[in-house]
Amino acid sequence: MSEWITIIGLEVHAEMETGSKMFSACPVVDSVEAPPNTAVDPLSLGMPGTLPVINKLAMEYGMMVGLALNCEIPPLNQFARKNYFYPDLPKGYQISQYDRPLAINGWIDIDLSDGPTKRIRVRRAHMEEDTGKLTHVSGGSLVDYNRAGVPLLEIVSEPDINSAEEAEAYARKLRAILRYLGVNSGDMSKGVLRFEANVSVMRPDDADYRTRTEIKNLNSIRSMYRAIQYEVNRQIKLYESGDTVRQATLGWDENAQKIIIQRYKERPDEYRYFPEPDLPVVVVSREWVDEVRARLPELPDAKKQRFVEELGLNDYDAGVLVAERAVANYYEAVLTAGIEAKAAANWIISNLFGLMNKASVDREAIADIPATPQKLAGLIKLVNDGTINQNIGVKVLEMMFESGQDAQTIVDEKGLAQVSDTSLIAKAVAQVIKDNDGLVQRYLEGQDKLFGALMGKAMGALKGKGNPQVVREQLTEQLNALRNDS
Ligand code: ADP
Ligand code: MG
């Protein structure tokens, strides 16, 4: 059986989180929390006689995204009317961009688990306005225009993505960039960021791409991953049973975990695009582009490179720490509090992430955990200066993660300070040797690895607080003395 190649292009809609709408001063509100139809004005409602005015900040946010995605920003930008009829679009057309978009010809380097990066080309990014929201209830549909007119950036990739894993990596990287730029929260459950996947399969020797389908309604990156896998398998099965794939718009049913066919496309959509007569062509001067470029923060790829080259982190650690802006901020705050780069990375990746996973706290929510960067730094200092040992440090972090108490307070309240007093440790070790005669005999007879067991018992006798180095010295010394006696 010959193989199939997966071909995917992603279309991403990202709201640009400015305070007001794309073409009027109407405020933008949380479209899940706010009561319906409370953030509307004559423009959002498509009243006759209203005139749009371009939101400059939204254009600049869009430009920032374009620049962060390595795009060219053409000198002329034009809005266009995309005509279609739908109840969530009261004007009967959406103001979008057609042949003069805000940004073109960029790329995103995606990070794959099993190798280096792969470059996915970004065809274009254009500004438009969001539509309202329909809710279907028994007996009819309800419409909420709060979202109508919210600035929206559509980012279209070339079909360079060849697996569900690559689509996921693209989505994660793009979401991270939006968050670094501070133009979009990336909260897919609220619909401020939405992905649509175009999917087809082909044989290696096909001269051209085959028919693609388009999957909509993907409300998490996980659903997108599953939907793509499902759709690829569906298409392969169709071809292998002698059928063909029909061009269609598909939906993903999260409960049933399957694709539903929403409609077949007989003809391409006919939107009768024409230049928006109510808006001027936007001249994007090079000075304006430079001014916006100067506002770009350090982005994930650059930050990762810096962490590797200047801080000496390995590739993996650096990649994990920059993957979410909130994590990178947290890490940098621990460094600012005086902790060495590698130690800070280890505590976050090996210990803090484990606690967050167990408590189902998402990485991007790290800014909200009670164990703040300053408190983690305080804990690492107590370990470094020998006030507590490493293992107790891990336990203190667990308690700090729950309570938000600082490390010194936890150590004082629970009496966890490290015991380094040699005579105290010598006494505990002597007792352990006395109580574990069998183990000690077998050790002396040559079972060297029983040293670890005796070490564990000695640490246990000291309630885990013993200075491991001193305990090890005492144990070695006392066992050697026994060996010499016998
Ligand atoms: P339009 O329909 O607007 O002219 P295209 O059809 O060229 O645009 O592309 C729309 C999206 O579909 C893009 O993201 C593109 O990468 C993707 N795409 C195009 N052809 C295929 C294909 N054969 N398989 C999968 N994705 C595709
Ligand atoms: Mg669009």
Image (spheres, grey):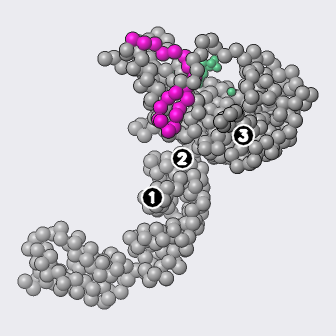
User: Residue 82 location, x and y as percent?
Assistant: 75, 21
Q: In the rendered view, does 468 fall on the left or right side of 404?
A: left
The kind of residue tagged 2 is Ala
Which corner quadrant holds the C terminus?
bottom left
Q: Which residue is mark 1?
A: 358
Mark positioned earlier in the residue sequence (3 or 2): 3
Instruction: State the mark number for residue 323.
Output: 2
Of the four image quadrants, the one with ligand 2 is: top right
Q: How many marks?
A: 3
Q: Are marks 3 and 2 in contact (CB under 8 Å)?
A: no
Residue found at x 64% / y 40%: 191
Residue 50 vertical placement versus 389 (above, below): above
User: Residue 442 location, x and y as percent?
Assistant: 11, 74
Q: For ligand 1, tell me if the residue under mark 1 lies within 8 Å.
A: no
Q: Which residue is mark 3?
A: 16
Q: In the rendered view, does 356 fall on the left or right side of 477?
A: right
Residue found at x 18% / y 84%: 435
Q: Nearer the viewer, residue 220 or 323?
A: 220
User: Residue 143 location, x and y as percent?
Assistant: 74, 36
Q: Residues within 10 Å of mark 2 (few under 14, many from 20)?
A: many
Residue 17 seen anywhere in this rendered image of the structure: yes
Magenta residues, start to end = 242-260
Q: Is 304 one of the magenta-colored residues?
A: no
Q: Residues within 10 Å of mark 1 (few under 14, many from 20)?
A: few
Choose top left, top right, bottom left or bottom right for residue 267: top right
Q: Nearer the viewer, mark 3 or mark 2?
A: 3
